[in-house]
Image: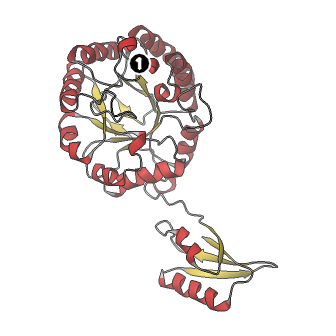
């Protein structure tokens, strides 16, 4: 950590700062420049809140060299995280495909989609049972009954399943019926929920908040891992920019950044990023080419009548075509 002192800092204020740094267990070297005095602070600053140093009158600027995420950082675990299931492994060489409807609407619907995605080559069946919606009047999901239907459909077609949790109170139901627990963008910084999931036995998929930086995303993963659950999967779903043609702006560069910074697997959700079904195939190909460990694709048998996110959902035939085209990209990368 590097602390730049103000030009007119009083000696008494500097002494207060340095004494408190020593009390925190740090050592430092003082470098006197032509215009500024700089303190090179030595020691582990990963758990130290550097922002609080601005409370000192003597401090002009603070640069924290160490990243604040410890467990999620690649330098602390060079080997890539892999999460194994019976028939596939997340974080292995081949990308893993998650597919299914935004919302579980009925047994007939989820069974139909499960059949489609299973035959198309998907590994994981997605389906929302508890739906956090912008409008309180929109469909909120079938809740526990939806989880039971998801569980039934996934087991019938020998698929792993995933669903989004919105409340700590529902965690026991997810432990009973869900294989992978998803944290949506709105809850990426719901720290009490993240800490509870850190005690779960299930893998956690953590979606990036649409207004959050990569560092904030990794720090949320750190909350889960700090409680003991190392099986975290990251998912890029687009960030909010000035663009209005798409629902969000898919940040493909985040896949490369995560690969550079972390050992955690990273997926991409092109459906939520685009908000338009016709863009999903191109964004899916780009994501796999960039090195994503998997995709999350929304599929619905009748998008025109979907109770949520129909505009970004692929019809069964389109999903089958997408899977065929992805195989060409995957084969070319091997």
Q: Is residue 231 above or below residue 140?
A: below
- The front one of 188 and 177 is 188
Above/below status of 59 relative to 285: below
Along the line of sight, the residue nearer the viewer: 30 or 309: 309
Estimate the x, y position of residue 170 in percent, counting from the top left: 22, 42
| Residue occupying the point 29% across, 30% down | 140
Does residue 15 sit above or below 148 in this rendering?
below
Residue 194 spot, x, y in % from top left? 34, 50
Quarter holding residue 128: top left
Coordinates of residue 196 in the picture (x, y in percent): 28, 52
Q: Please name the residue shown 49% across and 27% down the image.
A: 270
Q: Which residue is outermost to the bottom?
A: 12
Q: Where is mark 1, residue-wise?
A: 310
Report the residue that reaches farthest toward the right. 34
Marks counted in the figure total 1
Question: Would residue 136 be found to the left or right of residue 144 on screen?
Answer: right
Which residue reaches farthest top? 317
């Amino acid at each position: 950590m590097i602390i730049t002192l103000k030009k007119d800092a009083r000696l008494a204020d500097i002494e207060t700062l340095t004494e408190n740094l020593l009390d925190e267990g740090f050592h430092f070297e003082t470098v006197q420049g032509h215009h500024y005095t700089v303190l090179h602070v030595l020691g582990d600053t990963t758990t130290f809140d550097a922002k609080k140093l601005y409370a000192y009158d003597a401090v002009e600027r603070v640069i924290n060299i160490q990243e604040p995420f410890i467990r999620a950082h690649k330098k602390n675990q060079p080997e890539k995280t892999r999460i194994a299931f019976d028939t596939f492994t997340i974080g292995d060489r081949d990308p893993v495909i998650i597919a299914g409807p935004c919302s579980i609407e009925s047994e007939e619907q989820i069974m139909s989609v499960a059949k489609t995605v299973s035959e198309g080559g998907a590994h994981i069946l997605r389906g929302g049972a508890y739906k956090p919606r912008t409008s309180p009047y929109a469909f909120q999901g079938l809740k526990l009954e939806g989880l039971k239907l998801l569980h039934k459909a996934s087991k019938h077609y020998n698929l792993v399943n995933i669903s989004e949790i919105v409340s700590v109170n529902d965690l026991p139901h997810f432990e009973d019926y869900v294989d992978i627990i998803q944290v949506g963008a709105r809850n990426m910084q719901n720290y009490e929920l993240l800490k509870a999931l850190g005690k779960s036995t299930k893998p956690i998929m953590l979606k990036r908040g649409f207004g959050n930086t990569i560092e904030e995303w990794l720090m949320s993963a750190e909350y889960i891992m700090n409680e003991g659950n190392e099986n975290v999967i990251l998912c890029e779903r687009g960030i909010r920019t000035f663009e209005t043609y798409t629902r969000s702006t898919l940040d493909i560069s985040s896949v490369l950044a995560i690969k550079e910074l972390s050992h955690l697997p990273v997926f991409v959700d092109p459906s939520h990023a685009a908000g338009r079904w016709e863009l999903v195939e191109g964004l899916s190909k780009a994501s796999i080419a960039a090195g994503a460990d998997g995709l999350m694709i929304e599929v619905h048998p009748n998008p025109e009548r979907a109770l949520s996110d129909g505009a970004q959902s692929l019809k069964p035939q389109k999903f089958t075509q997408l899977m065929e085209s992805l195989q060409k990209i995957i084969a070319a990368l091997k």
